[in-house]
Image (cartoon, coloured by chain):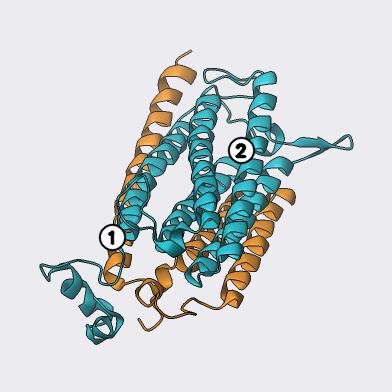
Amino acid sequence: MSDNIDTNKEKKTSTHKIGIYLWIWGLLFVLSFFSYMVDWYQFQGLLRWTLILIFMFLKAGLIMAFFMHLFWERYALVNVLLWPMTAIACFVGLMVAEGKYTVFTRFIYFVLGE
Amino acid sequence: MDQSSIEKLPKGWKSIPNDLGSDQTAFKGVQWGKAMMWIFLLSDTFIFSCFLISYMKGRASTVVEWPNPSEVFALDFMGVPVPLLLIAIMTFVLITSSGTMALAVKYGYEKNKKMCGWFILLTAIGGLTFVGMQAFEWSKLIHEGVRPWENPFGAPQFGSFFFMITGFHGTHVSIGVIFLFIFARKVFKGDFDTGKRGYFTTMKSDYVAIEILGLYWHFVDLVWVFIFAFFYLW
């Protein structure tokens, strides 16, 4: 943790180089452009969903790792922040199953029933 | 705890039980305000996740066709409808403001008062632009007849999810803009150089506050990444 920034603020230059921020900034622009292109070229189906998710997770990862400094942060803090995300993933899984069941019953009783 | 004693502590996986089970301050070398902001952002993550998951469930379980977002959010440019034009610009504006905020944090730690203040102001202007464009988008959709309970494009749930999710995000951006202006003023006044005590806390002002503000602002950008992917592109 030699470049953990907030603990050596006595030194004059204690931050990361400006290049890393500009690089990440540029990458975020490029990735956003790509995800806009997914809609522009009207990719459909599995290809569309895969591309959207890849670009989304890449952008989120870059923002968290470098703009929010998690890459340089204390490991205990990083783990405390990231493990709860598995609970969200479980919730998503549960609600996918629930959504399928709801639309199934609606088809049976509302659409076919009429 | 100073830097040299932190460097002597275990690294990697072994640092986790060492930091958390040591019956002392957890997260060695992390300023308490920063840790608290992270805990708040974690809880905010859960709130936004609940919104997006309920949107997913609502959209997956309706038997009426979902409105096509690239048509609903298209904008006429010289008579030609361009899909998601405004949303794309909003995305780029928010990423730009995130980049200027990252630079403000960097200059803050270098105690470069002028650059830090100007980059915070730029960030605030980016945020204001974003909120302005969102207000335009809302009024456009309301004119077209989108309501939380009905809309002319398809499934009636569309409106309630749209207003709830983008509204909650826009509120976050607006609050962020207010704090950016407050902190820009504090930076230009030199509060962070003199260590003047703030009015929210009795603690001495420190440039670490700029990083904490930056965490919040980057989080707002982070949430938009997910909203852009799931609400506008999906």
Specify the amino acid type for callout 1: Trp
Q: Please tell me how crowded label 2 is: few (under 14), some (14-19), or many (20+) other residues with Cα within 10 Å.
A: many
Residue to which mark 1 is pinned: B32
- Name the foreground residue: B87 vs B120: B120
Asked if residue A92 shows in the view, the reply is: no
Other residues around mark 1 within 10 Å, as few (<14) / some (14–19) / many (≥20): few
Q: Residue furthest right?
A: B78
- In the image, what residue occupies the spot 50% across and 46% down? B182
Q: In which quarter of the image is residue A94?
A: top left
Give the chain of mark 1: B
Question: What amino acid is labelled 2 in the image?
Answer: Val
Please name the residue shown 29% across and 55% down the image: A84
The image's mark for residue A57 is none
- Image mark 2: chain: B
| Residue that appears at 61% across and 52% down | B121
Pointer 2: what residue? B131
- Give above or below for B164 relative to A28: above
Give x and y (percent) for residue B194. Answer: 42, 62
Picture colour for chain B: cyan
